Amino acid sequence: MVSFVRLATTFAAAPGESLLSWLSRLCAANDISTSEFSLQIMGREAGEFAALATRDEHALALECVTGVGAASIREMMHSGPDPALTTFFDQPIPWSSVERSKRRIAPGRLAKDQTPFLRALWSIRVISCEPTSGERLVSRCTCGQPLWWSSMHRLLECASCGTDLRSIPMAMGTDEEIKVSRFWASMYSLKPRRRIEARSMLYPAVRDCDPAKLVQFAEFVGAIRELAPYGGLHTGTLILLGLPQSVQQLSVSWRRAVERAMVEFLSSEFCGAARGEPAKNRIQSSMRPVCRTRV
């Protein structure tokens, strides 16, 4: 039986920090590797460090090891019994929308940090740019190797070539990429005010939907055959943000494809529960401005 021992040096996670980033910094402060932490401290396999963030069963053990309450640790975890959904702090998100295998970083932001750490928001795949600076997030070193958590030695180093990740050239996203990234960053923000502001940007028919369903909607629309080559989820988000005008401005064939997708997706009780309004009525009211322009 494993006896969990408190680390000699402990500190709280930075606001908005990912669980794995925080644990990595704790390992460095205690002069142990992440594989040693998994094997010797947590009693898991050496290569299971990344899995610590996805299994609720580890919360109590991490509380003993770090001195931070299990409830706070659980908030930082991605877990839950639903095979399709997990949590991002206290909000639902599709499992497929969370990058769990690789570090995603903003080199320029890290270079400016007094104490560098990886933001939890960077692990959300739909966020392609660092929300504050607008620089593109990267998950590969300049040597071409992915930044795998499983082979990581130090949080800010490439395991393959030893490059300091803060030295990776920074590239800015396009205006649309930054817009999409900032919307989702606000939707999943820890600050309620930012979430309210993000929802205020949405069309009333979808404003009450939980964030996981909004992501699924953007994925659903972006996966339409006619639109997928033009950006997929990125395009789906822009259409979501521009409803209903964004649909009206599409070509006839694309508009019809999006309208069919909206009816099909919304008909599966996509939203409306918060207001107690039947889904069918919500669909009809939300589609009416769009359908007036159909050819």
Image: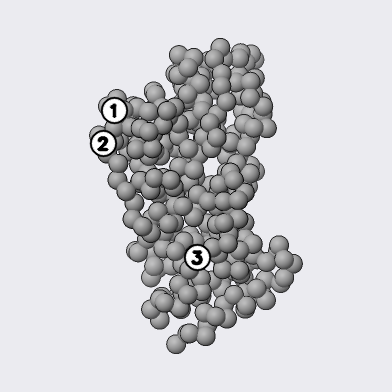
Q: CA distance from mark 2 to mark 3?
A: 34 Å
Residue 175, quarter of picture: bottom left
Q: In the image, residue 210 lies at what x, y percent?
A: 62, 56
Query: What's the mark number on residue 221?
Result: none
Q: Residue at x 32, y 48 (%)?
A: 172
For label 3, the SS is helix
Q: Residues within 10 Å of mark 1 (few under 14, many from 20)?
A: some
Q: Residue at x 45, y 78 (%)?
A: 248
**Residue located beneath label 2 in the image:** 142
Which quarter of the image is occupied by the C terminus?
Answer: bottom left
156 on left or right of 120 = left
Q: Is residue 130 above or below residue 275?
A: above
**Looking at the image, can residue 223 be seen?**
no
| Mark 2 vs 1, N-terminal side | 2
Q: Residues within 10 Å of mark 2 (few under 14, many from 20)?
A: some
**Residue located beneath label 1 in the image:** 163
Q: In the image, residue 2 lies at what x, y percent?
A: 62, 15
